[in-house]
Image (cartoon, rainbow, N blue to C red):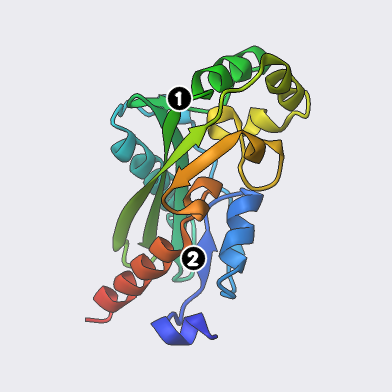
C-alpha cells in the first residue's frame, strides 16, 4: 500500500523527534522520512491545560526544525503527556520521583494525551490535532514498582512507564481508546490529519 501516492504526499516528511518509539510507529506506515530531533525545554511551557500544553510543545518542536530547513518539507512534531486529575505528569526527575508517580497511578485511571503538529517548512502552513486515551492501572505492589524502576526504563518516559516494550505493560489493567496514542503516535489520527493537511494545501 503506497501511502504517499494515496494521499498525494510529494515532498519529504521530517520527524522532529528522537523518540525511537515514534520512529518505529511512523515506519509502520511505510512512508520514507527523515529524523531531525528538536531539543525543547519543557519546563519553560507555562500552559496548564493538558490539551493546549501538548499541542504547544508539539508545535515548538515542529517549528524549530521547520525554521532551519532549506528545502520544502512537511515537519511532524509530536508530544505525549500523562494526566491524572487534570494535572500533567512529566518524566520523573529521579528514582524517588518515579516511585511517587507510579504510586499515584496505581489502582487509578489516568489519561494519555498525544498531540501532533504538521508544518510546511516553506509556506509555514500548519495543522494540529490531539487524541486522548484512558489507561487504568491495577493496584501495584511497592516491590514491583521498585523492581521496574531498577530497570531504568521509567526515567525517560512521561508518567514513568511505557506500555509497548517493557514491564510497564504489566501494570495496565485496561485501556479505552487508541493504543498507539499511549506509545506516542496515534497512527489513524496522523493519517487523517496528514490527509486533510495535504488536501487543504492543494486547494
Q: CA distance from mark 2 to mark 1?
A: 29 Å
Give the crowd class for mark 1: few <14, some 14-19, many >=20 residues within 10 Å.
few
> Which of the numbered marks, if any, corresponds to residue 70?
2
Q: Tell me which corner region of the image, top left, top right, bottom left or bottom right, holds residue 75.
A: bottom left
Q: Hey, which residue is sitting farthest left in the picture?
A: 203
As rendered, which of 72 and 131 lies closer to the eye? 131
In the rendered image of this protein, does residue 195 appear above or below residue 116?
A: below
Q: Residues within 10 Å of mark 2 (few under 14, many from 20)?
A: few
Q: Quadrant of residue 28?
A: bottom right
Q: Give left or right: position of 125 versus 5.
A: left
Q: Quadrant of the N terminus?
A: bottom right
Q: Quadrant of the C terminus?
A: bottom left
* Residue on which disc 1 sits: 43
Find out whether the residues at labels 2 and 1 contact each other: C-beta distance under 8 Å.
no
Q: Is residue 203 above or below residue 99?
A: below
Q: Position of residue 39 (x, y in %)?
A: 54, 40
Specify whether residue 161 is in view: yes
Instruction: Measuring from the top left, give residue 9's x and y in whole percent.
Output: 44, 79
* Front-most of residues 105 and 12: 105
Q: Residue at 32% of width from left, 26% of height from top?
A: 86
- Residue 8 visible in the current orientation: no
Measuring 64% from the left and 48% from the top, which residue is drawn there?
A: 164
* Mark closest to the chain's N terminus, 2 or 1: 1
Left or right: 55 with respect to 32?
left
In this picture, is 140 found above or below 82?
A: above
Amino acid at each position: 500500500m503506497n501511502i504517499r501516492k494515496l494521499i498525494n504526499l510529494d515532498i519529504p516528511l521530517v520527524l522532529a523527534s528522537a523518540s525511537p518509539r515514534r520512529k518505529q510507529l511512523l515506519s509502520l506506515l511505510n512512508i520514507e522520512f527523515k529524523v531531525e530531533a528538536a531539543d525543547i525545554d519543557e519546563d519553560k511551557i507555562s500552559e496548564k491545560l493538558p490539551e493546549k500544553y501538548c499541542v504547544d510543545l508539539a508545535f515548538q518542536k515542529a517549528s524549530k526544525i521547520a525554521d532551519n530547513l532549506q528545502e520544502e518539507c512537511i515537519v511532524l512534531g509530536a508530544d505525549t503527556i500523562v494526566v491524572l486529575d487534570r494535572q500533567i505528569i512529566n518524566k520523573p526527575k529521579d528514582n524517588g520521583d518515579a516511585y511517587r508517580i507510579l504510586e499515584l497511578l496505581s489502582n487509578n485511571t489516568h489519561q494519555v494525551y498525544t498531540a501532533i503538529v504538521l508544518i510546511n517548512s516553506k509556506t509555514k502552513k500548519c495543522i494540529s490535532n490531539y487524541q486522548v486515551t484512558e489507561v487504568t492501572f491495577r493496584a501495584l505492589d511497592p516491590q514491583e514498582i521498585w523492581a521496574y524502576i531498577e530497570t531504568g526504563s521509567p526515567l525517560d518516559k512521561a508518567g514513568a512507564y511505557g506500555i509497548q516494550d517493557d514491564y510497564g505493560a504489566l501494570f495496565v489493567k485496561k485501556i479505552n481508546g487508541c493504543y498507539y496514542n499511549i506509545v506516542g503516535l496515534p497512527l489513524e489520527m496522523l493519517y487523517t490529519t496528514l490527509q486533510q493537511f495535504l488536501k487543504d494545501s492543494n486547494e
